[in-house]
Image: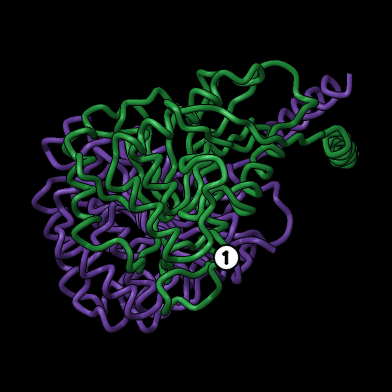
Chain colours: A purple, B green
């Protein structure tokens, strides 16, 4: 009887929560220097007061459906989610060549990359419904690289999570600036991250005594969280449902720790 | 009001559960070949029917307080927990020399190690309150090595978890026998696992296409889950509260997946 009552109340509460949620999304125009950027914000409008928040950094194609979907998902979990625009308003490359060229521009100019992501972070923190002491940053591929550079810039965030991001940096000594916790979700056979890059990352993080966790998922290559990447691992980038689910759960565990009251 | 009712029922149910639990523990004598072994069993006697179960393999000192504590902890979580005795009844070394000698005996005789751990697994599976289709194996240090060898022996378990175990094996080709999922919780600066051993493990698991997850915890050396290991990482073995907590959570997430109905 107690079990039945408990199950009933659980079910009832879940229904109430589902009905009550009201996810709002909007494009947010802001500036970094003289460049106009356009980010994407998602939150549950029924939540009162200041909420924990997550910065969601896009892949090499810039903000698109995938990034927005992740923001919406986080908003449904109760976070204020914001996808910062690293590239600039309207810069949304659509071919491998232009995506590669755009990403490379920032990988070759780390100071600019850090300015852009920090501008996005500032934008998120100043939202009236955001608890600025509880902000994490996550990123996918290019965005994974970017959140690690955010950490290396010394940004004040509760934690960063890289999903299949590049791990190398031209400035390993900057790991000394890292004040935040780091979680890396990595494809164990990702051909885009060389062994030398991996070893360099471990050395960098260990030397700087960064609080990090590194998870490698077997049979998994680049872009493993994105269904649009297809299923052919021989291409070096492919979706992996198990690794996607596991890494998302690992992120939730990480959030439970860093956002603990 | 709904929230209040929900909170009340949650609280009430938790109280009922806490009152109702009745953890039973007992020593279990059994045989492997002509050798008498003595394992430790822990379970919640109030649970009806067959339960998921966890084999808990001891460190190099054999079954002691630490192993028993982990079994009790798992029993409180609802699992039937059993610490198999790898060494033999009464073989409980107390000095580094004798612990090292005993562990080495099995590391140098992998077939015997596999027989011993499989004998323990059989013992657990035949308990009347165990669901033999839902059995995991976890192990610490020497026990971590042992559960990986259990996997390499082709044992039918839902998953194995190694906490700061040695990852090398004289029989890497046996990874082809692995039918189970593998989780490795590793200290990122564990001096007892060389880089060559790590690389060998990845190659072994990748070549055999094993479903594995590997987590490295920063600033963490050998024995990181055991408070008795002290706090001096320069000794190469030390407790790390964060890595202990995080790896336990990772194990729970792993169990949620492998024991899913």
Percent from the top left, x then y, of residue A224?
A: 29, 41
Please tell me which residue is depicted at 22% across the width and 33% down the height of the picture: B174
Is A145 in front, or is A103?
A145
Would you say B79 lies left or right of A231 here?
A: right
Is B73 in front, or is A139?
B73
Q: Secondary structure at mark 1?
A: helix
Would you say B117 lies left or right of B25 here?
A: left
Please state the chain letter of the residue tagged with numbered disc 1 in the rendered image: B
View extreme (front): residue = B34
Quadrant (top left, top right, bottom left, bottom right) of the N terminus of chain A = top right
Instruction: Give the residue pinned by disc 1.
Output: B241
Residue A26 in sight here: no
Is A124 in front, or is A255?
A255
- Vertical side of A199 occupied by B36: above or below: above
Percent from the top left, x then y, of residue A252?
A: 53, 49
Please tell me which residue is depicted at 11% across the width and 35% down the height of the picture: A234
Percent from the top left, x then y, of residue B34?
A: 44, 27
Would you say A249 lies left or right of A86 here?
A: right
Percent from the top left, x then y, of residue B140?
A: 47, 51
- Vertical side of A248 occupied by B98: above or below: below
Quadrant (top left, top right, bottom left, bottom right) of the C terminus of chain A = bottom right
Residue A209 in sight here: yes
């Amino acid at each position: 009887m107690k079990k039945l009552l408990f199950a009933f109340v659980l079910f009832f509460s879940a229904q109430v929560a589902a009905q009550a949620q009201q996810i709002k999304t909007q494009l947010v125009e802001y500036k970094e220097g003289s460049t106009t950027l356009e980010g994407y914000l998602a939150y549950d409008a029924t939540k009162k007061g200041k909420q924990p928040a997550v910065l969601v950094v896009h892949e090499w194609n810039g903000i698109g459906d995938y990034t927005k979907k992740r923001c919406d998902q986080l908003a449904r979990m109760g976070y204020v989610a914001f996808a910062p625009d690293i590239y600039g308003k309207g810069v949304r490359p659509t071919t491998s060549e232009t995506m590669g060229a755009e990403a490379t521009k920032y990988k070759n100019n780390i100071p600019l990359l850090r300015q852009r992501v920090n501008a996005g972070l500032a934008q998120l923190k100043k939202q009236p419904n955001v608890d600025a002491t509880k902000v994490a940053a996550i990123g996918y591929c290019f965005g994974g690289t970017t959140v690690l550079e955010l950490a290396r810039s010394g940004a004040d965030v509760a934690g960063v999570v890289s999903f299949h991001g590049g791990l190398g940096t031209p400035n390993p000594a900057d790991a000394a600036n890292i004040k935040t916790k780091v979680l890396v979700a990595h494809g164990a056979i990702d051909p885009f991250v060389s062994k030398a890059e991996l070893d360099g990352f471990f050395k960098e993080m260990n030397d700087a005594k960064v609080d990090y966790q590194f998870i490698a998922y077997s049979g998994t290559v680049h872009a493993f969280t994105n269904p649009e990447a297809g299923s052919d691992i021989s291409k070096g980038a492919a979706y992996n449902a198990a690794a996607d689910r596991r890494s998302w759960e690992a992120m939730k565990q990480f959030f439970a720790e860093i956002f603990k009251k």
